[in-house]
Amino acid sequence: MRHAVLLSALTGAAVLAPVGAVLWEAPARPAAGAPAAPAAATAEAGTGGAERVVRYRGLRIRVPDGWEVHRLDRDPARCVRFDRRAVYLGRPGERPDCPARVVGRASAVHVAPLGDGRSSRTAVRADRLASYTVEPSVDRETRVALPEAGVAITGVYGDDPAALQRVLRGVRLSASWPGEDAPATGRRADPEPPTPRASGSGGSAAAPQASGAAPRRPWARGRGFDTCTAPSLDTMARWRDAFEVTNIYIGGAARGCAQPNLTEAWVREVRGMGYRITPTYVGLQAPCGPRPQRFTKRNAAEQGRENAVDAARKARDLGIPPGEPVYLDMEAYDTSKKGCRKAVLDFVDAWVGELEKQGYRPCMYSSAASGVRDVARASGIRKPDGIWFANWDGRADVYGDRYFPDDLWSPHRRIKQYRGPHKERHGGVTLNIDSNIVDGYAY
């Protein structure tokens, strides 16, 4: 997904080239003169005002002006991105074309089949969501199941839940749906996900540790990659020969991509293939950073603790046991601003202390030129046990970085993201990834 980075525009140092658009993408707006919705969306005329209405599996959804609408059964390569004002309908395809890095959120809605997608026979109240309230939450996300239509709705918001709440309150249900959403080809609108390869089918995949074997070391060494959304199990098996470590984005208010594959079973299967995993939480960001999801100088410590509690909850939900590492994703920020720098350190200090209380090993991802350098130089704060630092200099070496000394976070406590977004192809499957060299903590 994501990631931060060493940026010249914020730090004043020419550390890494392209900045600007790679740091954060504003919520998408239709180009001048462009139609309000993609052709794939079925809109009703005469809805009045600037809204449109789209239908999906018996639901009528009022879509505000300027929001995109995407039908994933007709566009299976579409990435479900939460940094754009959009409504996504259906299950994503097995191999969505997601960027390596998306951080930050706008209001967005994803409506997908619930379980096998069958509607229940319960009574239908057309306006069941008319008074639905989006309660503010640390991860800025809400989910509601509608078994009457056989769907679940996931909604996210940026700073204010009001826009998301208006969309959800405008959803109406019909007593039955006649299948008008099925594609013209006659295929099911939402096919079941493909059956993944069995664990270990990637050639060199290692089997889970046998009973009585030597204890697994807490750190890993080797090649790693990270991408915005957890790939399918089939893709992970095909990529196993090329990589030993993969990253997952387990939650957070600034996590920019949906994670339809990321479940406890996915984590178990991928580890069974022999991968080590770096669980990462994309929480609130620095008050002087470019993302809209921010903590403030005043509430930095409080938010750091709240984010740590939520990160531990997300890790437990994925079956990641206590004692394992969880990385805080702190994207690049303007480190020249003293007050902002202190707020980041307060947040990190609180994150580290609370995550330890929750039973997990606190680690941190950030730019070598901002977050990692500031934490390395700081005194009087609790510091992460391990780091994952971004310096896109193309040098696959966790030591010798000019922004902090080699004696910190050593040995086996470092991961370096040495190359930013690019495409690679392994086992016949192409992904957009960042490249990492690993000699640090992993699950």
Image (spheres, rainbow, N blue to C red):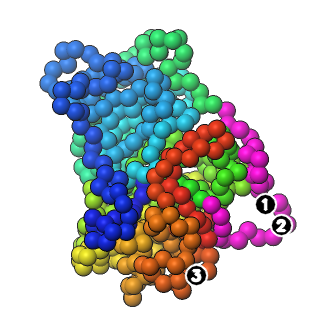
Q: CA distance from mark 2 to mark 3?
A: 26 Å
Pick whichever of labels 2 and 3 is earlier in the sequence. 2
Q: Residue at x 39, y 85 (%)?
A: 377
Nearer mark to the viewer, of 1 and 3: 3
Determine the secondary structure under disc 1. loop
Q: CA distance from mark 1 to mark 3?
A: 26 Å
Q: Residue at x 63, y 42 (%)?
A: 235
Q: Position of residue 289 (x, y in %)?
A: 28, 64
Residue 288 vertical placement versus 434 (above, below): below
Q: Residue at x 27, y 64 (%)?
A: 9
Q: Is residue 308 visible?
A: no
Determine the secondary structure under disc 3. loop
Q: Residue at x 29, y 74 (%)?
A: 335
Residue 410 - label: 3
Q: Main secondary structure of the magenta part?
A: loop
User: Per the image, is 212 magenta?
Assistant: yes
Q: CA distance from mark 1 to mark 2?
A: 7 Å
The amino acid marked with disc number 2 is Ala
Residue receiving disc 1: 209
Say if mark 1 contacts mark 2, CB within 8 Å.
Answer: yes
Nearer mark to the viewer, of 2 and 3: 3
The amino acid marked with disc number 1 is Gln
User: Per the image, is 37 magenta?
Assistant: no
Residue 147 vertical placement versus 398 (above, below): above
Per the rendered image, the range of residues in magenta is 195-223
Q: Position of residue 132 (x, y in %)?
A: 30, 38
